[in-house]
Image (cartoon, rainbow, N blue to C red):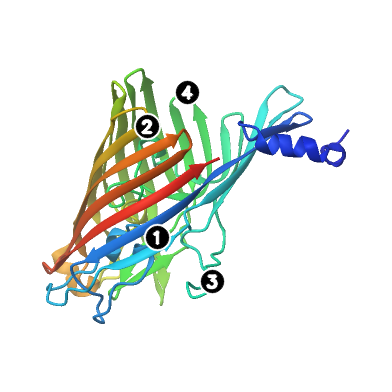
Amino acid sequence: MTNIKLIKKLTITTILAAISSSANATYLENTQVKYGGYIKLDTIWSDYSDSSEDGSVYDGLGRDFYVPSTTPVGSGVNNPDAVFDMHARQSRFNFSTLSKLDSGKSIKTKIELDFIVSPGGNERVSNSHAPRIRQAFITYDGWLFGQAWSNFQNVSVLPETLDFVGPAEGTIFVRQSQIRYTTGGISLSIENPESTVTVNKSRIETDDASLPDFNAKYTHKSEWGHIAVAGLIRQLTYKAQGIDTDETAYGVSLSGRINVGKNNFKFMLNQGSGLGRYVGLNIAHGGVLTSNNNIEAIDSTSGFLAYQHNWSTQIRSTFLYSFIEIENDINLLNLTGDPTQSSISYSANLLYSPEKKLTFGIEFKHANREVESGLEGDLNRLQFSAKYSF
């Protein structure tokens, strides 16, 4: 009997029982079907030390979650009023399957959606934000095909924060299409290429690389936690206005988790030339187009350290420090404008889970961004969130 015929025979009672089950799963012939996700409300109070270039209060993506490059910088003369925002855009839903094949092997699929960083309705009436694909992939016999977290990133060391990303300037953070192979603690991947290059003081996104991005990662796991080291090599390109040039970029990342009783430390340290979009939510571009029509890769060092302390079985806190230092060539500033030189942030939160999957929390974040001219700006943010996972 085919899956379609079986679905037709499922009774309303069976479907409702599957939906209400604690595992959020049911079986259709030899396929396990699961769903999950969470509903999350964020209330965010943001106080910027400086206004936007036109003198108004900053209004953009950085109001929904912390994006280091959006922290306004200035002389501090025009100190704007604090702003308050509420949204449920981080809420997400995922659907996955696990099927046993005739060969005895298994094949898995997963698709995940959320509503953040997407267009949609306005705040005047509907707030009808469009869903977007976060992940969509197949895994079979050690292989992964589709869109997923980059193999260069260690997702498991992201600390528990109310902010959408947390250590935004200090972490590798990329999802993209890829082909990955994993055996034991080693994983190799080829991934979709994309370059961000500064041309005449503007960011140009180029999608004309002749090769994919290559990366490899080794993860060692133990009772005390785990440690991972990853390497990346890729091609920065610019092909426009009669110019055809490219430059090799590379990066390394060391990350891990160290358990200390019921508590833990998480960390990441990244260094590279031309990392660009891979780190800091693209706070630095991959390279700069010089007056000789060559690409000069931009060097950067970034990382974070987080400590999570469990005060009780229901109450916990995460303390976080995150940074990035960008080595812009001062001889090219006339071509690049006034790029970011550094960004740091500190945060601390208090999370309370009266039930296993229900969490209420409050978090304070302080951030500072400085550009090459010496101008800087601060952000103080207080956030309250309510989240229920299913």
Closer mark to the observer between disc 4 and disc 1: 4
- How far across and how far down the image is residue 185, in percent? 43, 25
Is any atom of residue 126 visible in this view?
Answer: yes
Q: Earlier in the sequence, mark 2 or mark 1?
A: 1
Amino acid type indicated by mark 3:
Gly
Mark 2 and mark 3 in contact? Answer it, CB < 8 Å.
no
Tell me the quarter of the image containing the C terminus. top right
Q: CA distance from mark 4 to mark 3?
A: 46 Å
Secondary structure at badge 3 equals loop
- How far across and how far down the image is residue 135, in percent? 54, 48
Q: CA distance from mark 2 to mark 1?
A: 44 Å
Amino acid type indicated by mark 1:
Ser
Secondary structure at badge 4 equals loop
Q: Earlier in the sequence, mark 2 or mark 3?
A: 3
Q: Which residue is mark 3?
A: 121
Amino acid type indicated by mark 2:
Gln
Question: Residue 60, relative to residue 258: is it above or below?
Answer: below
Q: Which residue is mark 2?
A: 314
Q: CA distance from mark 4 to mark 1?
A: 31 Å
Q: Which residue is mark 1?
A: 195
* In the displayed structure image, the side of residue 212 where residue 103 appears, left or right: right
* In the displayed structure image, the side of residue 181 where residue 18 appears, left or right: right
Closer mark to the observer between disc 4 and disc 2: 2
Secondary structure at badge 2 equals loop
Q: Which residue is mark 4?
A: 184
Mark 2 neighbour density, 10 Å: few (under 14) some (14–19) many (20 or more): few
